[in-house]
Image: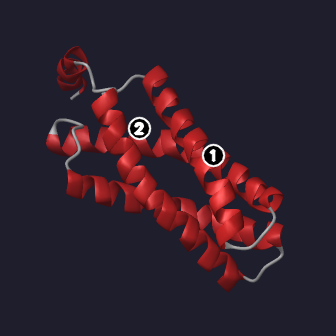
Amino acid sequence: MRGTADRIRHAVSFEVIGLLAITPLGAWVFAMEMHAIGVVALVGATLATLWNYLFNLGFDRAMMRWVGHTRKWPLLRVFHALLFEAGLLAVLLPFIAWYLQIGLWTALLMDLGFAGFYLIYAFVFNWAYDAIFPVPMGALADQSALE
């Protein structure tokens, strides 16, 4: 299982790269000022960073209990990303509507747009992260001691 420092590196790098991509893209797609989308993206990234750490820790612990390892295959990555985004969507929807002074339906469509971007981004980022920073073999052996 990954250690705390690795989980922090993962969460922070995920959010920073995501912010750099989503802010100008969101301003363009939704025809809003970059500042407005930037605030929504920054609040979303802050909440997502906390959620990312907690969600991935819980997901990996559940995997250890159920399958005995934390290696994720492509279909599991899809489930992982969908479940993560569903939890984040529930938290961000009221904030987006309130901050941008838009209706819940418009906020939902906007949030779904952000979620669509992050679904694809999360899949690609996490797959690349696992390839660039694989779990050390010693950590795999340590995982069996946690059971």
Q: At label 2, which amino acid type do we have?
A: Leu
Amino acid type for the residue under numbered disc 1? Leu
Q: Position of residue 133 (x, y in %)?
A: 34, 26
Is 19 above or below relative to 64? Answer: below
Q: Nearer the viewer, residue 134 or 20?
A: 20
Q: Is residue 23 above or below residue 20?
A: below
Is mark 2 in CB contact (under 8 Å) with mark 1?
A: no
SS of the residue at dot 1?
Answer: helix
Quarter of the image with the C terminus is top left
Pinpoint residue 59: horizontal percent, then vertical percent. Answer: 35, 45
Q: In this rendered view, identify the residue nearer to me: 24 or 131.
A: 24
Residue displayed at 52% across by 65% down = 115
50 shown above or below 118 = above
Side (left or right) of 10 relative to 30:
left
Residue at (68, 57) in percent of width and height: 24
**Mark 2 = which residue?**
57
* Image quadrant where residue 22 sits: bottom right
* Quadrant placement of the N terminus: top left
Which percent across, then down, holds residue 32?
A: 78, 69
On residue 20, the disc is: 1
Disc 2 to disc 1, C-alpha distance? 25 Å
Identify the secondary structure beneath mark 2: helix
Tell me if residue 64 comes above or below residue 115 in the rendering.
above
Label count reads: 2
Residue drawn at 78 percent across, 59 percent down: 34
